[in-house]
């Protein structure tokens, strides 16, 4: 008997007389009836607490707001499925990441910013979820550039995690974002930009 087989055999033997697990209690809240205006206020509060910059705009204001947030970028990347009516008219700085024409890590690292949409946002935790759809792109484009501008349709905001899970396809490559990337060392010194963008601009769009 190999070492692996012996280990597995011992595990099987140890578990043989284990009692059947009991039912898992699921008494937590599964849904919420929080009004839209309160959902927006709660999400903004959580995102700002995480040091994200947040704009709340109507659909006609979206292109101008995106242009303002990207004005200092010498280059920015967008996923192939982004709504082109959102984009600044000047496309000289724009790079498109598409299936069959993906940007390399080196190219992404040399790009100042990224613009994406989002799949669902959880107000209670201040979490934005990207699912790899055409208007959000593959995970790398939202993690490598140092500045992420993320569009959040109001219709995609929910209060609770169970509500968000019901809207997701968990087989998709989900990216969960709660503020700019940050971590702390043993002395609690905050360091930003370790695991992703150090700057997060969120544009919440009413009517979208």
Image (cartoon, helix red, strand yellow):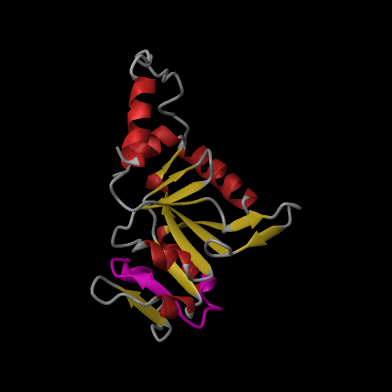
Residue at the farthest bottom position: 92
Percent x, y for residue 201?
A: 54, 62
Q: Can residue 206 be seen in this view?
A: no
Range of residues picked out in magenta:
68-87
- Queried whether the magenta region covers residue 72, the answer comes back as yes
Q: Where is residue 165 in the image (x, y as percent from the top left)?
A: 36, 38
Location of the N terminus by quadrant is top left
Q: Could you tell whether 130 is left or right of 71 in the image?
A: left
Relative height, residue 154 to residue 62 (above, below): above
Query: Which quadrant of the view contains residue 3?
Result: top left
Q: Which residue is drawn at 33% across and 29% down?
A: 9
Name the outermost residue toward the left: 100
| Vertical placement of residue 124 versus 44, above or below | above
Seen as rendered, the residue at the extreme right is 187
Residue toward you, 133 or 107: 107
| Residue 120 is a magenta residue | no
Residue drawn at 73 percent across, 57 percent down: 189
């Amino acid at each position: 008997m190999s070492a692996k087989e012996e280990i597995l055999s011992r595990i099987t033997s140890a578990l043989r007389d284990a009692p059947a697990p009991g039912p898992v209690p699921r008494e937590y809240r599964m849904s919420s009836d929080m009004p839209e205006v309160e959902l927006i206020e709660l999400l903004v509060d959580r995102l700002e607490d995480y040091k994200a910059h947040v704009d709340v705009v109507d659909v006609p204001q979206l292109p101008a707001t995106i242009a303002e947030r990207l004005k200092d970028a010498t280059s920015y990347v967008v996923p192939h499925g982004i709504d082109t009516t959102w984009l600044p008219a000047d496309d000289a700085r724009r790079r498109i990441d598409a299936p069959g024409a993906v940007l390399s890590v080196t190219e992404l690292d040399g790009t100042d910013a990224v613009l994406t949409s989002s799949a669902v946002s959880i107000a209670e935790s201040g979490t934005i979820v990207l699912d790899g759809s055409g208007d959000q792109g593959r995970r790398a484009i939202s993690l490598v550039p140092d500045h992420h501008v993320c569009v959040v349709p109001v219709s995609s905001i929910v209060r609770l995690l169970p509500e968000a899970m019901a809207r997701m396809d968990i087989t998709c490559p989900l990216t969960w974002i709660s503020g700019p990337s940050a971590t702390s060392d043993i002395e609690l010194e905050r360091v930003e930009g370790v695991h992703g963008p150090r700057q997060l601009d969120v544009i919440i769009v009413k009517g979208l």
